[in-house]
Image: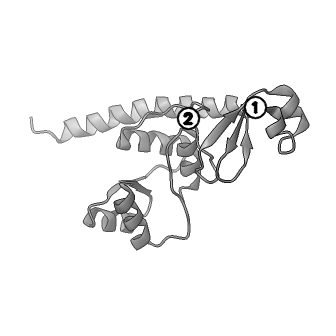
Amino acid sequence: MLGDLARWLRIMGYDTVYSDNYNDKQIIEIALLGDRVIITRDKSLYIKARKASAKVILVESIDTREKIAEVAVKAKINISVDPDKSRCPECNGVLEKTNDKNRVKDRVPPQALASYNTFYICTKCSKVYWEGGHWINIRRLIENAKELAKEYNKTMYKRRADLLPA
């Protein structure tokens, strides 16, 4: 399952559909109709999607940072995080920025309300986020994924060069 990757793509601001409830046919249909890219570890789905002319990426990595790096390189997307562009990691909803503590006072811990001035409210599920101490870990993971993507890129280019005739 790639739920962790879906959450991270959302944090990075990418509109990401994820559910365990879709069968392969539905996934391919959603991708084709919405001009989306299927990201999967399932080789069977990968083959079916290719046959249906859907955009698809087969993920081989297991570690979260490696998955982010692999997808970023294969999809040619940036690895970065900006809270103003992030989406709700839970439901993919758009986050609305607010400095109005009255809007969130009943939905965040008192310590967060006292410590932070900026909050992000999901327009879909109403969950509230803020740049707490966990953002240090988020940024660290993103930076690690960026470094891994550089290495992954070098490896991919080396493999391609090895395949070219001399």
Q: Give the mark, 1 or 2, whose residue is nearer the N terminus.
A: 2
Quadrant of res 53: bottom left
Quadrant of res 55: bottom left
- Which residue is situated farthest in the left direction here? 166
Q: Amino acid at mark 2?
A: Lys
Mark 1 to mark 2: distance in Å? 17 Å
Q: Which residue is drawn at the image coordinates 44% and 59% (left, top)? A: 41
Quadrant of res 43: bottom left
Q: In the image, 163: left or right of 152?
A: left
Looking at the rendered structure, the secondary structure element under dot 1 is loop
The mark found on residue 1 in the picture is none
Give the percent coordinates (x, y) of residue 26. Answer: 43, 70
Viewer-proximal residue, 80 or 156? 80
Give the percent coordinates (x, y) of residue 130. Answer: 73, 34
Q: Residues within 10 Å of mark 2 (few under 14, many from 20)?
A: some
Pick the quarter of the image with the C terminus: top left
Do the CB atoms of the residues marked 1 and 2 lie less than 8 Å apart? no
Pick the quarter of the image with the N terminus: bottom right
Q: In the image, 58: left or right of 140?
A: left
For disc 2, the marked residue is 85
Give the percent coordinates (x, y) of residue 162. Answer: 20, 38
Viewer-proximal residue, 94 or 63? 94
For disc 1, the marked residue is 132
Examine the rendered structure and indicate whether residue 155 appears above or below residue 52: above
Q: Residues within 10 Å of mark 1 (few under 14, many from 20)?
A: few
Q: Amino acid at mark 1?
A: Gly
